[in-house]
Amino acid sequence: MNWGKYRNLIFYILTIAFFSCLMYFFIIEGQTLEIGENIVRKTNTGSTWENFQESFKANLHHPLALLLAQIVTIILVARLFGWICMKIKQPTVIGEMIAGIVLGPSLLGMYFPEFSASLFQKESLGNLQFLSQIGLILFMYIVGMELDLSVLRKKAHDAVVISHASIIIPFALGIGLSYYVYQEFAPEGIQFTSFALFIAISMSITAFPVLARIVQERNLQKTKLGTIVITCAAADDITAWCILAAVIAIVKAGSFTSSIYVIIMAIAYVFLMIKIVRPFLKRIGDLQAGKKTISKPMVAIFFLTLILSAYATEVIGIHALFGAFMAGAIMPENAKFRTLFIDKVEDVALVLLLPLFFVFTGLRTQIGLLNDGHLWMTAGFIILTAVTGKFIGSALTARFVGINWKESLTIGALMNTRGLMELIVLNIGYDLGVLSPEIFAMLVIMALFTTFMTGPALDFINFIFKSKKSDEEMHDGHDSKYRVLLSFDKPESGSTLLKLAHDFTNKMNGNKSITAMNIAPVDEMHAYDIDEYEDAQFKNVIETSHDLKLEVTTLFKASTDIQNDLAGISNKGNYDLLLIMLGKSMYEGSLLGRLLGFTTKIINPEKLLNTVKGKGNIFNNSPFDDFTLQILDKTQIPVGIMVEKDFKSADKVFVPIFNLSDFYLLEYAKRLINNNNSQIIILDAAGQIRHNIEVKELIRSIEQVAPNHITLYNEKKIEKEFLNSQDLMLVSSKSWKNLIDSKSLWLSDIPSTLIISNP
């Protein structure tokens, strides 16, 4: 018997047994020490089940358990409404704002009061508020880091004029509005100056993060207009937060003269941050240059800077959020460094903590208080004042400095976006007691409306100023060129698809057009590093195009709905073929997956409605991932889906024909022969080619032009060695499904495969 094999097992058993006996000995001996001590023992009344129920109920209402339940509910509801807004081409922040209102007394509290009172107990709201405040501090830190101050310094001429006009005009209108609503809506004991200043600042704010995302999504970031509006928003943000800091100081002090000391301290704080702290952080950032990660000591230094800055401004009396914003703005300007640091912060801040702020705002928003026509008319008047001051004020100023009407109106529409930044201002006013519940609800509605209207307003402006030039460009698109569009998500995928496109078009000279497109999720980028992101995505494609001596047009777009944007560009661009890579995800298609950012192959929500109508099956048994399915469903041109296995070139190509509907594959085989001198082997799997005169004529015509380049193969059994010798397999999308379903033994041994759909 080999004791070596069991040595570890014997040692394990003996160790457990010895120390278990030792523990038992000490427990027995320890109980003898209780003699003479006043030991209080719990006496349980009732059955074991009743005791368990009482314990379970107590655990449910424990503050930590309640907070965790609140967080889970908030994140799920916020993601649901954010996803809905994304689908209707609206910023996800609108959905999250609506989610907050839905979970508050305006809806959940009205129709399910017991559940609302149980989930959001009054005594638990303090925990929720503090967590949401931490989320806001981290968010304002990110906002500060996303400001590209170098752009602000270089291109601030017209932008600063427009920006400051877009603050002073709505600010003045806000003061005027306060004159009419003060007596009816101001809380008791609040001075007119304090009330008016908060109304005015709420009219003047612009949501820089939302605006930056919209600019990216609409591909405006490289245009002069995009640069101006980003610079305007950055200048607006800095100015508005400085004004807000002064307003808070005045409100807390009670008058301007009383706030002078606070303002002087705030100026000293800003001077200290810019002249001392910023150079210190820059030197630390320089040590990080070129590294792909940030060390923990450096992370600690920057977080300490954030916390100390927020603490200083809170103590001074101008709110911790200003300190967080300032800490972000003075971070080292290296784009890669900021990207690395933002990636560390924003996942927790935006996904976990920020939705808590939306719901906390929603719990304060009582739309039910607006219970008569006069109150709704007042709310409408507030919205009109806000839009007039920000939209029209910005647009007229932009026109005055020499910008054309279309771009001026676009600037006005974008600057009118208030989003989350408005809610932050309103909550500060509410906390200070300056805003009553009624006026708070009206201003929240105004924030929602002005953010929601940005997208439709931009679409309407583009529709009005739709130029004849664009129509001519669309008309000119109908030429004899063979147009290939390849869409990729990873740089290496773009290189592979470009090689394939080259094989299809190599000898066509000037009669071809190849466009390489990358559509990136807008949430993965920041306003200041979008150029660097784009360069990284296209680096492999450009290098491959140089190697192949191939002229390629690059197209980059930031998007919140990649599938629809890809389908739209494909359909409108007069392309003859779209090439994409096959994606696979184990979470493809489920509603929960859509909400949380992934999907599952088990249940596809878009098939749910068709199932109810009797048009389909809820279970998604397609061999394609959900992304590919949507592309196939929405595009009106042929789509080539690449399954890549070390693809180099399509020199040897295998084309299995399973039924008559697969014969369109021969046209693609013909292109590969003409442009790449490919060797084509056609498998007549169903034995239908030799009985079809039309197909036999097509093969004969190919043989006449390129003899010895096409071979008809009638064998039913395909050898593994034969498949391994091929560079590419062309297969129809229908036959691909049959191959997957049949679980053919040779399927795992197939070479790189191009699955071609024929719409």
Image: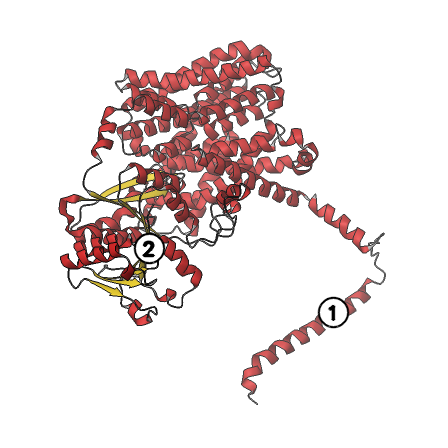
| Residue contact at pointers 1 and 2, CB within 8 angstroms | no
Real-space CA distance between mark 1 and mark 2, rounded to the nearest whole angstrom: 83 Å
Q: Is residue 118 left or right of residue 757?
A: right
Q: Is residue 177 above or below residue 553?
A: above
Q: Which quarter of the picture shows residue 214?
A: top left
How far across and how far down the image is residue 426, in percent? 52, 25
- The quadrant of the image that shows the C terminus is top left
The secondary element bearing badge 2 is classed as helix
Q: Residues within 10 Å of mark 2 (few under 14, many from 20)?
A: few
Q: Residues within 10 Å of mark 1 (few under 14, many from 20)?
A: few
Marked residue nearer the N-terminal end (1 or 2): 1
How far across and how far down the image is residue 149, in percent? 33, 33
Residue 365, which numbered label? none
How far across and how far down the image is residue 33, in percent? 80, 65
| Residue on which the image places disc 2 | 660
Q: Is residue 331 above or below residue 372?
A: below
* Amino acid at circle 1: Phe
Q: Residue at x 61, y 44 (%)?
A: 68
Looking at the image, can residue 642 be seen?
Answer: no
| Residue on which the image places disc 1 | 26
* Amino acid at circle 2: Leu
Q: Residue at x 35, y 32 (%)?
A: 215
- The quadrant of the image that shows the N terminus is bottom right
How far across and how far down the image is residue 302, in percent? 43, 43
Looking at the image, can residue 420 be seen?
Answer: yes
Residue closest to the eye, 242 or 680: 680
Q: Which quarter of the picture shows residue 560?
A: top left
Q: Which numbered disc, 1 or 2, marks the residue closer to the eye?
A: 2
Q: Is residue 474 above or below residue 758?
A: above
Residue closest to the eye, 161 or 33: 161
The secondary element bearing badge 1 is classed as helix
Q: Is residue 138 left or right of residue 699?
A: right
